[in-house]
Each structure stands twice: as structure tokens, then as C-alpha cells.
Image (cartoon, grey):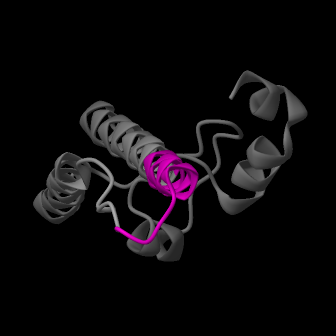
Amino acid sequence: MKSYPANHHSVAMLETRLRQLVATTENLGGPRYEHGETWSAAIDLAQVAVERDRSEALRNLLDELQVDIVRALARLNTGDYGICEDCSQSIPLERLRVLPEATRCVSCERDHSRDPRIKACA
């Protein structure tokens, strides 16, 4: 089992990703749809609802990514970075290069994503 010690590059990369996610979330704002004179009120309302739902879904995804990055930073501080939180095996360096906030190996992440209990709680 190989762990990856906290280093300046990993911390800087995760902190940069976190700042970018926070800025993106803050810039989402409300729906960008403007009332058109030829559209009926029902269509206007439907368009606003679609935009609101899309913005909310994106905001939720960005919030989840922020939580993942904060968890990865905490694991860097405790020396657990690069170790799968489920099976305790090393997370391949290639995975961490692509997804530095990963806290699970590919196999455990796949199992975690398929777990119906997780989807029921969401």
C-alpha cells in the first residue's frame, strides 16, 4: 500500500480547483431567459422553470465537487491521500493526476456509485 505524501503541487492543484468551483458556483446566478413578446405566459414560465432546474442541478454538482476537494485536502494533511477510503489499497497515481480529489480507487468508486442505498438517500 503506497501513500502519497502531501506536497506543494498536490495542495496547490486542489486549492486551485476549489477556488474555480466556488467562483463558478457564485457566477451561476439566476435564469438568463428574458421575456419575449411573442411567447405566451405559460411558455415563459416553463422556460424559467427549466433554467432554474438546470442551474440547481449544476449548483448541486459543483457543491459535491467542492466537498470532494475539501476531503482530499484533509486526507493530504492526515497522510491518507492516495489510499482508497473503502479498501485501503493505493489509488493509482494516474487516477490522482486526472482526478486529484479522488478518495476511492476505480473499483470501489464503481461499487459506491452502483449502491442503491446511496441513490435512495440522494
Asked whether residue 51 is drawn in magenta, I would say: yes
> For this rendering, which residue is in front, 97 or 89?
97
Whether residue 1 can be seen here: no
Q: Farthest residue to the right: give it.
A: 116
Left/right of residue 45 with respect to residue 112 in the rendered view: left
Left/right of residue 98 with respect to residue 21 in the rendered view: right
Give residue 107's quadrant in the image. Answer: bottom right
- Decide: is 37 above or below 83: below
Q: Residue at x 47, y 66 (%)?
A: 39
Residue 85 in percent (x, y) is at 59, 37
Q: Residue at x 54, y 54 (%)?
A: 50
Residue 122 in percent (x, y) is at 68, 29
Q: Farthest residue to the top: give it.
A: 121
Total number of numbered labels? 0
- Decide: is 51 above or below 119: below
Q: Residue at x 38, y 49 (%)?
A: 62
> For this rendering, which residue is in front, 42 or 75?
42
Give residue 100's quadrant in the image. Answer: bottom left
- Decide: is 39 above or below 104: below
Residue 21 in percent (x, y) is at 25, 54
Left/right of residue 114 with respect to residue 55 in the rendered view: right
- Decide: is 91 above or below 84: below
Asked whether residue 75 is drawn in magenta, I would say: no
Dominant SS in magenta: helix
Whether residue 39 can be seen here: yes
Q: Which residues are magenta?
A: 37-53
